[in-house]
């Protein structure tokens, strides 16, 4: 049950776009329709931003876009805002294999 | 409004035991699988355990198998995590979450477990 691979950090300026990658294997990301993304502010519980690979819960702005190709999922945040600064985690569910596995997390800094 | 409220965390010596609880409200508790996720200090999220809505099926991450036991009382809308043979590396904030196909729309605020002598 190895963690999914994410970059440790990404950064961007207000208004710009950033993309966070999440690489797994054919046993998790590559074989799952249930990839999700979470944002976590310091000292807070995680907050669901994307589910089912590319769906946004109500209340999540369409600046957040996600996709998957093969064993890599991606989260793109456009029109960066200062309040987007947080840790972002990907997650994959694959009942036949590893069940649930998180990525190691990516710290987004808005410069 | 969906609410999840964890309790039961605290300081426990290595080898000790602790039981965490998660009180749920605002949704049909028995209709959903529930999950425990933990986060060690300064580290990332780690899935710990999952239980089906009926309580008949459970899953665990390898590092806690044989030491942790997840259960639920659907009559009291409460989720539990019984932790035994605790190790220093089990020190973390433990979150409960409502599981929808391994995706977590709702989370509790977390409860801190510290394993130390």
Image (cartoon, coloured by chain):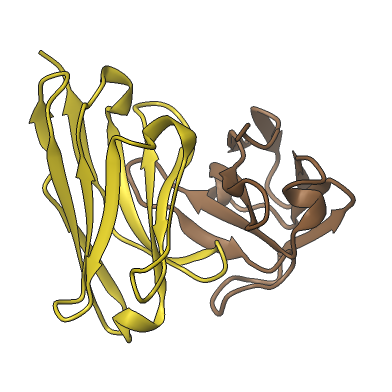
The quarter of the rendered structure image containing the N terminus of chain A is top right
Residue at image position (52%, 52%) is A39
Q: Nearer the viewer, residue A106 or B115?
A: B115
| Chain letter for the yellow part | B
User: Which residue lies at the image location 13% right of the left edge and 39% below the top edge?
Assistant: B18
Relative to A61, say whether A108 is above or below: above
The outermost residue toward the right is: A70
Instruction: Give the side of residue B26 with respect to residue B9, left or right.
Output: right
Q: How many marks?
A: 0
Chain A: its colour in the image is brown
Point 58% across, 71% down: residue: A60
Q: Quadrant of residue A78?
A: bottom right
Q: Is residue B21 left or right of residue B108?
A: left
- Coordinates of residue B31 in the picture (x, y in percent): 39, 83
> For this rendering, which residue is in front, A33 or B82?
B82
Decide which of A103, B101 is in the foreground and name it: B101
Q: Is residue B68 left or right of residue B116?
A: right
**Compared to A13, does B20 lie above or below?**
below
What x and y, as percent, mark residue B108? 29, 60
Question: Residue at 75% across / 63% down in the picture?
Answer: A65
Q: Quadrant of the C terminus of chain A?
A: top right
Q: Is residue B76 visible?
A: yes
- Residue A17 visible (yes or no): no
The location of residue B35, given as percent across then percent down, is: 39, 58
Residue placed furthest toward the top: B117
Query: Residue B59 vs residue B68: left or right?
Result: right
**Quarter of the view holding residue A94:** bottom right
- The image position of residue B76, as x and y in percent, is 14, 77
């Amino acid at each position: 049950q190895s963690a999914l691979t994410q970059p440790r950090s990404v950064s961007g300026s207000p208004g710009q776009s950033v993309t966070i990658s999440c690489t797994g294997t054919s046993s998790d990301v590559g074989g799952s329709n249930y990839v999700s993304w979470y944002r976590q502010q310091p000292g807070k519980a995680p907050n669901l931003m994307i589910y089912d690979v590319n769906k946004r819960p109500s209340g999540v702005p369409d600046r957040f876009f996600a996709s998957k190709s093969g064993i890599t999922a991606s989260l793109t945040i456009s029109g960066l805002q200062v309040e987007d600064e947080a840790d972002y985690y990907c997650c994959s569910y694959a009942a036949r294999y590893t069940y649930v596995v998180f990525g190691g997390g990516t710290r987004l800094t808005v410069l | 409004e969906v609410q999840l409220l964890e309790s039961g965390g605290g300081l426990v010596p290595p080898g000790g035991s602790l039981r965490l609880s998660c009180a749920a409200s605002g949704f049909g508790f028995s209709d959903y699988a529930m999950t425990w996720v933990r986060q060690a200090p300064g580290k990332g999220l780690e899935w710990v355990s999952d239980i089906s809505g009926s309580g008949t099926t459970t899953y665990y991450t390898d590092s806690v198998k044989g030491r942790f036991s997840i259960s639920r009382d659907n009559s009291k809308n409460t989720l539990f995590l019984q932790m035994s043979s605790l190790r220093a590396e089990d020190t973390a904030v433990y979150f409960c979450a409502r599981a929808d196909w391994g995706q977590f729309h709702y989370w509790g605020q977390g409860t801190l477990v510290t394993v130390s002598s």
